Image (cartoon, helix red, strand yellow):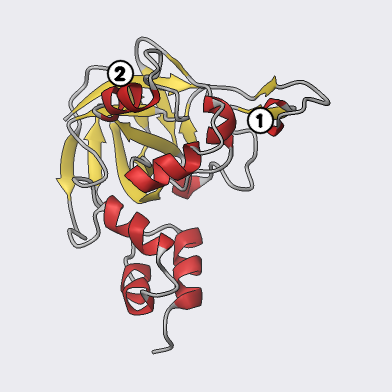
Amino acid sequence: MRLRSIQIGVPRDYGTAGAEDALDRPWTSAIAKQAVAGTVWVGRLGVAGDVQADRRVHGGPDKAVLAYGHGHYPQWREMLGRADVGPGWFGENLTIEGSDERTVCIGDRFAIGQARFEVSQPREPCATLNRRFHRKDMVKLVQGNLRTGWYLRVLTEGWVEAGMPVTLVDRPCPQWPVIVASELMVERAVRREECGRLAACPALSESWRGSLTAVAPAP
């Protein structure tokens, strides 16, 4: 695996007041991220220079960094008929070659340069993606294709740089690939026992543990 690119963004205002189409009405987001060159510092709360517009649902220690599989972009370009879709389009900070939601598991620990990361949960696509791509069905497409990306908590701060190898250091929960966790969250109302098992994964984020515990059967 290799770190192909690093992206950061700051909140920006989009849209036009009074627009007829809801996708064109005013909105603010830092989802549009741009690649940065050279060594970049990654701290406990994320990549230096990256800012979240809505900290109620983004950021924090459990969702400090968003990673995305580099192999997804050609698929999106073909599906959407857009040649411009690439790193940063989904709000991702780290674009990683050689990994995706099927090969990455909750609790995986990775080393990149000086930094150490732990997978905490899948990314849950929100309506901002619809606005970003100007498609009312973008969230459904991301969720349906399960090309969601995954969040990382930062265990050890440090400098990273595009081109560095991404090394799997530990895999304590091989039974929980990111894609399985995503499917389970969507189907949690009818997969309650599995919800309880996933909620017991020590590396799972607190927010996901709370959502899954709420539907899991009592012990």
Q: 201 or 42, which is in the foreground?
A: 201
Q: Residue at x 46, y 74 (%)?
A: 213
Q: 53 or 194, which is in the foreground?
A: 194
Relative vertical location of residue 28 with respect to residue 178 in this rendering, above or below:
above
Residue type at tag 1: Leu
Where residue 186 sits, quadrant-wise, is: bottom left
- Badge 2 density bin: few <14, some 14–19, many ≥20, Cα 10 Å: some
Q: 194 or 105, which is in the foreground?
A: 194
Where residue 100 sits, quadrant-wise, is: top left
Mark 2, residue position: 161
Relative vertical location of residue 55 with respect to residue 200 in this rendering, above or below:
above
Residue type at tag 2: Glu
Q: Which residue is drawn at 38% across and 69% down?
A: 199
Mark 1, residue position: 23
Q: In which quarter of the image is the C terminus?
A: bottom left
> Can you tell which of label 1 and label 2 is closer to the viewer?
1
Precedes in sequence: disc 1 or disc 2: 1
Badge 2 element: loop
Q: Residue at x 46, y 44 (%)?
A: 140
Mark 1 → mark 2, Cα distance in angstroms: 35 Å
